[in-house]
Image: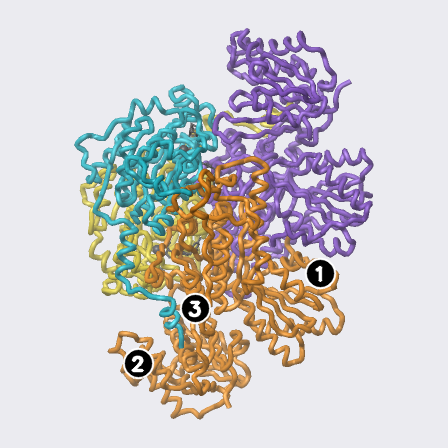
Chain colours: A orange, B purple, C cyan, D yellow
Amino acid sequence: MSNESLVIRIGGEAGEGIVTIGETLVRIAAFSGLEVFTFRTYPAEIIGGQVMYQARIGREQVLSMGDDVDILVAANQLGHDEHIGELRPGGLLVYDSDAVTPAEGGDHLSYAVPFTQLAREINFLRGRNLIVVGFLTSLMGLPLDRAEQMVRRRLGKYKELLPSNLEALHKGYTHHQEHFAERPEFQIRPPEDGGEERLVMTGAQAIALGALAAGCRFYAGYPITPATDIMEFLSKELPRMGGTIIQAEDEIAAVTMAIGASFGGVKAMTATSGPGLALMIEALGLASMTEVPLVIVDAQRAGPSTGMPTKTSQGDLFLALYAGADEAPRFVLAPDSVEDSFYQMINAFNLAERFQMPVILLSDQAMATRVETIRPIDLSQIHQEKRRIPSLDRPEGNGYLRYALTEDGISPMAIPGMPGMTYTAEGLEHDESGAPSYVPEVHRAMTEKRFRKVETARKELHRWGLVNRWGDPQAEIAILSWGSTQSAVREAMERAAKEGILVEALFTKILLPMPDYEIRPFLEGKRAIIVPELNYQGMFAKVIEHRYSEQIIRNNIQVYRLNKYEGLPFKPGEIYAKIVEVAQRLTAGVLADRFLDEKLASV
Amino acid sequence: MSNESLVIRIGGEAGEGIVTIGETLVRIAAFSGLEVFTFRTYPAEIIGGQVMYQARIGREQVLSMGDDVDILVAANQLGHDEHIGELRPGGLLVYDSDAVTPAEGGDHLSYAVPFTQLAREINFLRGRNLIVVGFLTSLMGLPLDRAEQMVRRRLGKYKELLPSNLEALHKGYTHHQEHFAERPEFQIRPPEDGGEERLVMTGAQAIALGALAAGCRFYAGYPITPATDIMEFLSKELPRMGGTIIQAEDEIAAVTMAIGASFGGVKAMTATSGPGLALMIEALGLASMTEVPLVIVDAQRAGPSTGMPTKTSQGDLFLALYAGADEAPRFVLAPDSVEDSFYQMINAFNLAERFQMPVILLSDQAMATRVETIRPIDLSQIHQEKRRIPSLDRPEGNGYLRYALTEDGISPMAIPGMPGMTYTAEGLEHDESGAPSYVPEVHRAMTEKRFRKVETARKELHRWGLVNRWGDPQAEIAILSWGSTQSAVREAMERAAKEGILVEALFTKILLPMPDYEIRPFLEGKRAIIVPELNYQGMFAKVIEHRYSEQIIRNNIQVYRLNKYEGLPFKPGEIYAKIVEVAQRLTAGVLADRFLDEKLASV
Amino acid sequence: MVTTAERVAPLRVKDLKSGIKPIWCPGCGDYGILSSFFQAIINLKLDPAKVAVVSGIGCSGRFPAFARVYGFHGVHGRALPTATGLKVARPDLTVFAMSGDGDAFSIGGGHIAHAARRNVDITYIVMDNEIYGLTKGQPSATSPPDILELSLSGKTKGSRKGMVGLLDIHKVEEALNPILMALAYNASFVARAFSGRPKELTAIIEEGVRHKGFSFIQVMSPCVTFFNTYNHFRETVVPLPEDHDPSDRMRAMALAMEPNKTYVGIFYRDETRPSLEERLEEYRQQLSPTSMEELLARFTR
Amino acid sequence: MVTTAERVAPLRVKDLKSGIKPIWCPGCGDYGILSSFFQAIINLKLDPAKVAVVSGIGCSGRFPAFARVYGFHGVHGRALPTATGLKVARPDLTVFAMSGDGDAFSIGGGHIAHAARRNVDITYIVMDNEIYGLTKGQPSATSPPDILELSLSGKTKGSRKGMVGLLDIHKVEEALNPILMALAYNASFVARAFSGRPKELTAIIEEGVRHKGFSFIQVMSPCVTFFNTYNHFRETVVPLPEDHDPSDRMRAMALAMEPNKTYVGIFYRDETRPSLEERLEEYRQQLSPTSMEELLARFTR
Ligand SMILES: Cc1ncc(C[n+]2csc(CCOP(=O)(O)OP(=O)(O)O)c2C)c(N)n1
Ligand SMILES: Cc1ncc(C[n+]2csc(CCOP(=O)(O)OP(=O)(O)O)c2C)c(N)n1
Ligand code: SF4
Ligand code: SF4
Ligand SMILES: [Mg+2]
Ligand SMILES: [Mg+2]
């Protein structure tokens, strides 16, 4: 019998290939038909320092990074010391006996493997990583031919290196076969049929691919962790798709370049993280005012200020929702998985084009850097919104009104080059023609027009596929959240369901405007809402508490905030514990301090 | 009998001295012992274009710019055409008969005065303005000697110009005396005793003076309307007080210069408007993270983007409250009058120093540019908060911990130069010593520490004089608002009181953290709250609705938003109309759509 | 119906006026730049629908609204990156960027070097009045340090209206030398003109447009209201020496540094460097094209 | 008790180490700059409590944390304005600003000209590795356009780890010449050093500190991980010609433009210009002092 899923963690010195081991193993698993979900840390040092790479590998869709570790591979002493505490009772420690002295005792199995010496035996010290991979392939019951295939693929054109690499792989594989018994509890058998069709990618790649699929042909960006992966990917592919990429001199240049390109009629974006988004706020207002489509991706990281660039957070929500000089309408989207990152990028571009507005898409460090297996993408199903342009045959003498006051707020937008339609995209308040105007009535009408687009969008939201709702509709306990917390929530709910605790969850991928048409019915019949978030203040909780306060209070719904601010994603167990706590409170009739938890409410 | 207050408006071409006429008249009135409150518009053109200058002059404290105009002075045809509609029935039109053809009819008096010709008669064309001033001095019953004094004062050292200027003043004065009868309804007699001691200044001047009184000795700024007046004032006075002013190359340089100076131990500030504040958000987070005291003044203007630089707004509230990469605690203050601008600047610096945090003070275009008479300032009553510094005699070997985790969150801050205390103010997450650290527990502890300062402040708020509450505590109708709307609200309430409608108002000068200790009791017994604001979304209303939703809903309090977004301040009549409407609704039992007015709620 | 015939007929200045009356003060140097701009478009026989002007904020920033071409009035200091994005996305357009001296050398000062090193084919006109006009008379990085004295001495009448305190303290700083800076950035076309000499100005704008690469043009454009330097420039403006060879960058630098002379003309031009768009196109050509299908296949297991 | 005696004893390098271990890669050029900085402080006999180092973000930005002086690790690109505010508020301190090439010439590129024209007395050290180190190997404005080829050719080993796509497309842009730019800004002290030549580097830092005004020092500091230029600089670095007169700005420019040579030494220095703080003090002296009472009286009716 094989396991349904296994968590393996590898800890050691960066640069020693820990990440390579993990990435290779994950791809062997994925290409064998298994599902994967990864998580990794980054060292403080530029090179060197401790890292860990964790992969959850499963037969069915893997929902999250898991809680406890089934197999820990310690490549050095710190790799052992830092992680041994997370190895589950009955788990397996595999350590490099040339480098690690394991602690005494512990309720787990230990395999001492002389990886370094094995590498020496084949005279290929740099082959150590592949020896580890080979060893793990055998240990976990993965198919050797897939592993060989992966080695081939990774080497690419460097064919001359193939024999030595394969030898290393086999060395590890055989070492396990010869010295250790087969142990089903650490095996995970790929499905016989090779599994369903899947793609294997990181969140950053999903974002970049989504942009390309949406028709994005211009990218300007300034390097910043963890958004740079998007730019690096696009730097290779965008030119091959006929598009353009520019590494700008700073974030303000990046976003204004994108605005310039979009004004020119080309779908354009930039990507950044919190500090960069902060610098883009002035230009965001410009896009709002001039009504130029614009997509900004924010891969959130822990702050404030430079903070912890390699750690995750959901702390830019307020910045995305509210920042602007005076009132600058925008849309805010937040994918809730790697797969969803692809689709929400398409929504982002479509919303931007349809409403001629800026769209901010919030991802985060953990989701952008993790690898996931996702379902195949049917390109024929992807709709690319076209910009509404003015008709060329309008009655003579009728000047073109770029900012015409229409019922839905959207005005046809001319593209430079169109004859007879010249206008100035105006960052000052302006009348319908675009001419600057400070007349009170004009400012009132134009403010209403700009916001009317949001209201038009609100009416269309149900068509955009912006909500993810699952679980038991009869449940009295609800989870309402956004973004990358989804994975841990989903898994926690499955556990709860097994314990007979009914929970229903709703994740909205649009945060501005809020999808009332979904959330209001969702809240009916609920007695408690848990809002898990990776920030201190409970930003989304505040939005919910405000917007649905009437319903919440009238129906006496308890709101439980669950806030983590450690730079790390939630573990399913943390969410599960909260579900259990809330369930017990409901049974016992103990209420939460709904709104005014003095510690958390800072406005 | 004299009037209690009079509204005079002067309309004409900018550069023709409209503003000079107004400013001179206002000062004659103020220096005669009357109270004043002004409002003016700015032309779209750089020079020329239409302007209007309005002054409300009263015997008692003047609360607002008033509604209708008692006396309209039209210096050119447009000045007549644009403003005649606002002249109250029975009001007086004074027009330059050489330049204006008044409309037929109209329920008002008209004086045709050949101002231009009078100027020609004395061979002093540029004296026309003073002829107008002289005429109005007589018309309004102001003392001629005060007018003469004012002319002297304004000319300063240019004594040679005095005779011709005085001649012009007398020419206008005499012309009125000789050709028109005295009309008490257009007179406003100064108090016999010369009135109480008063200062006459603009909001911008009050801010600058407040900064100086608070001990600010460093200013860096980048020009932006309407904040530049603060910088221009300080450029003259700060060096004379031993301080430094720098015109920076942009707003990011301005705010980081201020941070650098403050790190060096000198109280420092910058001032800007919305677009500039947007650019400062990254550095605001830096001040939050490094815990460096910082004061930023935002004189709000209408937007988004460049918008309408010379028009007013209260639309930067969300930007001030919420903008930051991840979670960057700050304080947000908002004075509610010119006088209060002085005192809140002192609070701003004191809060910044005490809590080593950034403080944003929100003023606005209308309040920063208007002239008001304010009560004398007792400098001996002004407290200057001192920075908490580490004690030099700490036990040997005990390293200095810049970011020590204290109970109140505040850690003693060394000033460069102090021996043995060297540390690095760190924009990365850091441990108590300031060393960069990405350890989850450290991030958690430091996040809590930074927010703990806000909680400490919340406990002290009542000591800072941050709330303005007046009206009838028994009233069922409340007005809750902030900033410059105060003047119109106060006046509207007086009118309502005369009509027997009881209203109580609360203006908070601190918006982050909110003064719960004041607002909760205030809301007790209320049935309706009106929240007037100069923005579209009802930003403050949202804050209130969220934070006090429990109380609001349990007590069935109706919230009525009153939003104006035309670039202009409220008139008392607009507020008054809302009060009446709400009073009628309460009587009739018709409820407001409290929270979810779909049009206004955009999150 | 708007017919293409409209575009075939020879353009007149009035065809190029947007109908919006400039808000500039009577006598402002910026009018001269607008006229020369119109004339250059006509002389170059450009199709106005294929011309785009991107500006920052300032009196100068109001420029695009007055011309019947495509315009973008952006935020303060970002005319260059906005125009760069536009030009790179739409190489078929003739793109101008317009700044004031504050817009260009203070808040936007970081962008010029990068436009220059990219050699993006934009004609960048800095309408330099050596003052912040729109915000009513603060000194800029090109204001002479003794600007207050100059104003009070009446040589440059009008400036007494400016911000006296800021003008006074400006003496603690020196002025920048924009031509020298552009040369140090290796901009491939560097020129100066004076808005009081319209013919030369028109010619230089035309040359700037013809130049395939980044053209930096500093136009001295007096602000009659806050710093009226007409007299000063009438006295000091001289054409570059006849023998100046615009391919000689060192000599150009020396001329840029000469005190008391305001040389006008083309300091430097290098026609050998390909423009950013050309290089990007070359780069794309050298790659093998791809498609979504192919990209996704790479990620498929 | 911390006694002042501590400060009187001659400093040793170990007194200047903060105890925080640098996170830099072994062999990184930045170590050399840190050592020379320590040595310069010792040679100049500065009191560490009166020294402040302000940095931006990057590998370079980590500098202050490693030194036992007052430090400020600010945001990306703003070391100069932060240091300017500090120095002007506290002229008694010796203030350094530290940037990487990205920090200095890209995001912070707008500030150098203004620090130079103000002549604020700061020693500005740009730790130029011609790459974005901390963000793992993107090209910077000083990277050679052919940086990818250089890396792949193995001359500058290590760079294959960088961002290959971005390094490749970097060839469409040219590199900036920071020394030439600083000279064009009229910085009053302009020098270049190489972190692989510690003695010269120390001497130049000392000179920079002694110079009363804005000192711009570009230090070539190889990034062994992403663009290892040690060999390249060992070959191309040469001292400035012995006969170079550092008061000759034109000659300095010519030297800065010489291809294939990386001159190190003091290109330019002008000791005649007063610093910003001096000028501000002079300005204050010339005014009549005032008080709050006097100011308020002016507004009293
Ligand atoms: C971010 C931002 N900061 C400041 C301003 C205010 N502002 C408008 S124009 C201007 C400068 C004007 O000077 P310049 O660029 O020389 O243009 P000019 O008016 O002289 O043509 C400034 C500072 C602004 N609009 N936006
Ligand atoms: C506003 C902002 N944008 C981007 C970043 C990401 N970032 C960190 S360091 C850096 C540049 C590093 O290059 P350089 O300045 O040359 O320093 P080095 O690491 O090479 O010493 C960047 C882009 C940031 N921290 N903040
Ligand atoms: S203020 Fe100066 S620059 Fe602006 S329009 Fe008037 S004259 Fe021209
Ligand atoms: S990445 Fe490069 S610059 Fe950064 S520490 Fe390593 S070697 Fe030095
Ligand atoms: Mg200017
Ligand atoms: Mg670098």
x then y, percent, for residue C137:
45, 29
x then y, percent, for residue A380:
44, 68
**Quick check: C184 above or below D152?**
above
* Chain-order first, disc 3 or disc 2: 2
Mark 2: few/some/many CA within 10 Å (<14, 14-19, 20+): many
Quarter of the rendered structure image containing ligand 4: bottom left
Give the spatial CA distance, label 1 vs label 3.
Answer: 40 Å
Specify whether D133 is left or right of B20. left
Q: Nearer the viewer, mark 2 or mark 1?
A: 1
Query: Is B15 in front, or is A268?
Result: A268
Q: Are marks 3 and 2 on the same chain?
A: yes
The response on whether ligand 2 sits within 8 Å of label 1 is no
Residue at the spot of label 3: A379
Q: Secondary structure at mark 1?
A: helix
Q: Secondary structure at mark 3?
A: helix
The response on whether ligand 2 sits within 8 Å of label 3 is no
**Quick check: B555 above or below D214?**
below
Q: Which residue occupies the extreme left position in the image?
A: C243
Query: Is A576 in front, or is A513?
Result: A513
Residue at the spot of label 1: A551
Residue at the spot of label 2: A165
Q: Secondary structure at mark 2?
A: helix
Specify whether D112 is left or right of A454. left
Mark 3: few/some/many CA within 10 Å (<14, 14-19, 20+): few
Q: Are marks 2 and 1 on the same chain?
A: yes
The residue under label 3 is which amino acid type? Answer: Leu
Q: Nearer the viewer, mark 3 or mark 2?
A: 3
x then y, percent, for residue B406:
61, 57
